[in-house]
Amino acid sequence: MKQHITMAAILERGGRIFLVRPQPGAPWELPSGPLPPGVDDVDEEMDRILQRLGVHAPAVEEDFLQTHYFPAEDGQVVYNLYAPTGWQGEPAPPPGVGSGWFTLDELDAIDLLPGVRQAILEAFGLVQPPDRTGEILAALGAELAEAVREPAAPASSAARAAGLDVLRTLGGRDPGAAFQDLRRTAPELAEDIVDFALARGWSSPVLDRRTRSLLVIAMLAAQGRTGSPLRSHIEGALNHGASPAQVIEVLRMVAVYAGFPAALEAWPAMEEVFARRGIPRPGRTEAAP
């Protein structure tokens, strides 16, 4: 299924929403644009779209609101919606493109793309988002149902081998010995960890293991789980080729998006791992005795 990634912005002023119309007779829509090939940063592209419109948003990366999914003939539109705050300028679309300001009450009276109308109303809390649980479960291909099925099906040799390989690269040691340690410390969970969590969750080539390790560090730190799991996954990230600077940068991002307390609580675990590995910290000073 093909995905068309689009960025769109709600520009609100005095209780009115700015809309554009690409050509006469076309439906109205929010100022938007596609993500060009080879471009990965949707925030930067949203900023460029606004700049072309004559709008300056001081912190567009913090203005992301929600992602919506609209059907398309060859797949779906991934509609990343922003609501810029403190924006400045006078929106001026290119020649030939219509524009106008509309109140929320007027949206039902104009020809507006249905998905866009729903997205705007959800953003202002005027309608509840539809329950997409069924769609999500269908997209997962019943993976969740299989994961919780009782009794659990015996693991295949391929799943066990895949899980042990992840355990090897995560821990940097003999995976058989690590598996036996798991069986001693968590006998009821050991096989689930290796055959499901590691084999299925870590083995897909879509994300490399270094990226997955950095993601896990961010999630554990954001959840406040700063004990042994966080230390283990910091070790794993370094084993997977992440640099100390990348680990530090992940915790800096945790501070921005999950709060400085979460990052500060995770920081000692990182320093402990760095110290154990002899990783120099030239910018760090020890407290006076």
Image (cartoon, helix red, strand yellow):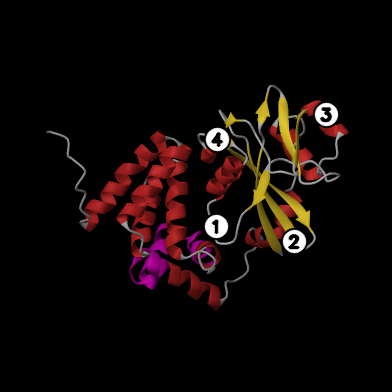
> Of the residues shown, which amino acid type is indicated by label 1?
Val
Measured in 3D between alpha carbons, the distance from the residue under mark 2 to the one under mark 1, in whole angstroms, is 20 Å
The residue segment tinted magenta is: 167-195
Question: Which of the two marks, 2 or 4, is nearer to us in this view?
Answer: 4
Measured in 3D between alpha carbons, the distance from the residue under mark 1 to the one under mark 3, in whole angstroms, is 35 Å
Q: Residue at x 39, y 71 (%)?
A: 175
Q: Is residue 209 magenta?
A: no
Residue under circle 2?
75
Residue under circle 3?
106
Measured in 3D between alpha carbons, the distance from the residue under mark 1 to the one under mark 4, in whole angstroms, is 21 Å
Residue under circle 1?
39
Determine the image quadrant of residue 106. Answer: top right
What SS does tag 4 mark? strand
What SS does tag 2 mark? strand
Question: Which of the two marks, 2 or 1, is nearer to us in this view?
Answer: 1
First in sequence: mark 1 or mark 3?
Answer: 1
- Which disc is residue 56 wearing? 4
Q: Is residue 168 magenta?
A: yes
What SS does tag 3 mark? helix
> Of the residues shown, which amino acid type is indicated by label 3?
Glu
The image position of residue 140, as x and y in percent, is 68, 60
Note whether 158 is above or below 225 in the view shown: below
